[in-house]
């Protein structure tokens, strides 16, 4: 039986990060997922029940979750569902946990800017396709290869004026029109 689950919802808590005694990075947060339906008699959308999950990520995913996800944001989580129960003081408690395989922002509610981690290696299939097209990382040019514009200021070619500015806290674009 495959217990894989995909859940859309909102991040209800701050991300908690830690490291296991064995040195494995972990991160978790509470996810709320509320269904909505259209009530024809009231002619309005109404909220249904909210399902609560604890989302747990490990290793590289944990680090990316800690850097990228903030309380209140809408996300999509894919992972394995685990149901746990325990008894305390004569009461039985239940919790639904998701061991996350993937976590990302729900672009239905806003935009995101993806930055690939340097240590993750090439995207499968891209390395071969680029080599087949004769593309690769060019050698650093020496002055003879640069041509008549060798005296120009290379820093001017890498102007950062065109790059959008992001809010450090939310990760959103500062200019709404961008």
Image (tube, helix red, strand yellow):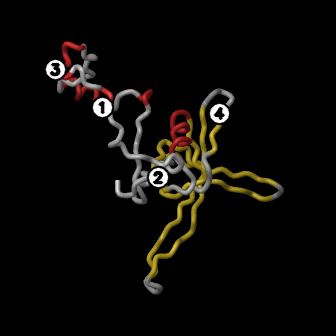
- Mark 1 residue crowding within 10 angstroms, few (<14) / some (14–19) / many (20+): few
Q: Nearer the viewer, residue 51 or 158?
A: 158
* Quarter holding residue 25: top right
Q: Position of residue 22 (x, y in %)?
A: 65, 27
- Mark 3 residue crowding within 10 angstroms, few (<14) / some (14–19) / many (20+): few
Residue contact at pointers 4 and 2, CB within 8 angstroms: no
User: Which circle, 4 or 3, is nearer the viewer?
Assistant: 3
Residue for badge 3? 148
Tell me how many marks there are.
Answer: 4
User: Which circle, 1 or 4, is nearer the viewer?
Assistant: 1
Q: Nearer the viewer, residue 3 or 157?
A: 157
Residue contact at pointers 1 and 2, CB within 8 angstroms: no
Is residue 2 visible to us here? Answer: no
Which comes sooner in the sequence, label 1 or label 2? 2
Which comes sooner in the sequence, label 4 or label 2? 4
Mark identifier at residue 173: none
Residue for badge 4? 19
Task: Determine the CA span between mark 1 and mark 2.
Answer: 40 Å
């Amino acid at each position: 039986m495959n217990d894989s689950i995909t859940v859309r919802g909102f991040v209800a808590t701050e991300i908690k990060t830690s490291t296991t005694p064995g040195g494995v990075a972990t991160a978790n947060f509470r996810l709320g997922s509320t269904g909505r339906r259209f009530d024809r008699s009231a002619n309005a959308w109404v909220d249904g029940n909210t399902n609560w999950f604890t989302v747990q990520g490990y290793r590289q995913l944990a680090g990316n979750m800690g850097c990228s996800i903030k309380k209140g944001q809408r996300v999509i989580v894919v992972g394995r569902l685990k149901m746990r129960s325990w008894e305390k003081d004569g009461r039985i408690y239940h919790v639904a946990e998701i061991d996350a395989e993937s976590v990302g922002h729900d672009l239905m509610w806003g935009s995101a800017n993806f930055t690939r981690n340097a240590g993750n290696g090439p995207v499968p299939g891209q390395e071969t396709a680029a080599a087949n097209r004769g593309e690769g990382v060019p050698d650093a040019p020496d002055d003879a290869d640069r041509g008549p514009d060798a005296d120009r200021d290379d820093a001017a070619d890498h102007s950062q004026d065109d790059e959008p500015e992001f809010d450090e806290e939310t990760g959103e674009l500062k200019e709404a029109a961008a």
